[in-house]
Image (cartoon, helix red, strand yellow):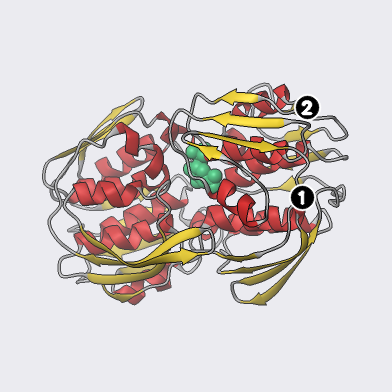
Amino acid sequence: MSGSSVAFRVQPSGPLRGELRVPGDKSISHRSVMLGALADGLTEVEGFLQGEDCLATRKAFEAMGVVCEDTSPTGMRIHGVGLHGLRAPAAALDLGNSGTSMRLMSGLLAGQAFDSTLTGDASLSRRPMRRITEPLGRMGARIESTEAGTAPLTVRGGLVLHGASFDLTVASAQVKSALLLAGLYAQGMTVVNEPGISRDHTERMLASFGVEVPVSGLRCQLAGGQRLTATAIQVPADLSSAAFPIVAALIAQGSDVLLPGVGVNPSRAGVLKILEMMGAQLSLLNVRAAGAEPIADLHVIAGPLQGVDVPSALVPLAIDEFPALLVAAAVAKGTTRITGAAELRVKESDRIAAMARGLEAVGVQVEEAEDGITVHGGGVRGGVVDSLGDHRIAMSFAALGAVAADGIEIRDVANVQTSFPGFIDAMSGLGLNIEQLP
Ligand code: S3P
């Protein structure tokens, strides 16, 4: 798939049935390359997401002298170069669509001896970067951006960083992680206090590499200068990608789907809680550990859903799943209200606007607010939707197509490759009536 002209057409589908192993977790795959690269020794990764975002991270580290070997279709061996072993890249590092790569790497690169420049595609070049450049600046980093505080970013090297204490105003794993990664290179202690829970994959994975990151409630800290020791990483299936078959199976009558080995880290599992509040029949079977992360086999059975007022405490725990949740809301009986979710406006697209326009286009009544959206559930007519080049918008409307009377055509879907390669085959394997156009 390439180009903005790629589209999906989804027709009303029968029940979805069977088992699907969704691809590896995007957040954890990025971190496996970053920490594996900085470690001493060989890190073996299983279940790596071969999507464009994580491959952009891999390419960036390769450009800084890190050898990454494929050991199986989703296996990778990373030859760590140690905390101070990265080499200056010959050119700007192109991070494509990936906000996680750009934000986390800004922190990590601020501690290097060399300068580096980070670029991205049109969407990434619009996303706010002051949330990392400002706090990193307080640690002594120098990162140049555009006047608007956006990429390209030039990260100056050869500076002495010092630890600092931060009170974040937004719960953001990307900001927290950028500060912790810079903290590895800083003198003294880096302390991050968050206003709410954000995903804790960085803290868990740093601990697997032998780094001490004491966590107490919403506060974590890291003493600079700690070295990383290579380890083995099992990447869980991505709950954010699982959200699309989960929602499709919940809404397509008669469905019964099993998704094995999905990450259910509590800092990410808000989507499951919200769907349960909506009345979803969702079971977590065989809950177990995959290294530092909890995983489970998710069993989903179709059934009626009710609208809910999403508790604001759950918003950061489900931040990437709102497009999928809004699809469930469109089919549910009654009204679903989301507030306190202004962050959705600065994701790969403005996801509040993208979902509002898309839902209206398929006959669903919505009201948009600055920090959220209200969806009035009921029947879905169908029509043509623009994903605005956002992978999660595209896949959400593909799930909704299962029950749209006239089907749904979704335009500009090439970016599905960033997080869910093989999406069409995976979903049609379960019985979704989906094809790629042209
Ligand atoms: C991510 C953190 C989240 C999430 C993004 C991935 C990460 O962003 O939306 O898709 O891997 O750290 P924020 O931390 O900015 O909320």
Query: On screen, 298 above or below 194?
Result: below
Residue linked to disc 2: 142
Residue 310 placement (x, y as % from top left): 25, 37
Q: Quadrant of residue 233?
A: bottom right
Q: Which residue is mark 1?
A: 227
Above/below status of 365 relative to 265:
above
| Mark 2: few/some/many CA within 10 Å (<14, 14-19, 20+) | some
Q: Residue at x 74, y 38 (%)?
A: 224
Q: Residue at x 51, y 57 (%)?
A: 414
Between residues 345 and 272, which one lies in front from this camera angle? 272
Q: Label 2 amino acid?
A: Arg
Mark number displayed over residue 266: none
Callout 1: CB less than 8 Å from ligand 1: no
**Amino acid type, callout 1:** Arg
Q: Is residue 379 visible?
A: yes
Q: Is residue 405 above or below residue 76?
A: above
In front of the other: label 2 or label 1? 1
Where does residue 324 sit, x and y in percent of width and height? 33, 50
Establish if 423 lies above or below 174: below
Residue 82: image x %, image y %?
81, 54
Which quadrant of the figure has residue 210? bottom right
SS for dot 1: loop
Quadrant containing the C terminus is bottom left
Q: Secondary structure at mark 2?
A: loop
Q: In this orientation, which residue lies closer to the viewer: 104 or 11?
A: 104
Q: How many marks?
A: 2
How far is mark 2 from mark 1, CA to CA? 23 Å
How many residues crowd around disc 1 within 10 Å: few (fewer than 14), some, or many (20 or more)? some
Which numbered disc flags the more N-terminal residue, 2 or 1? 2
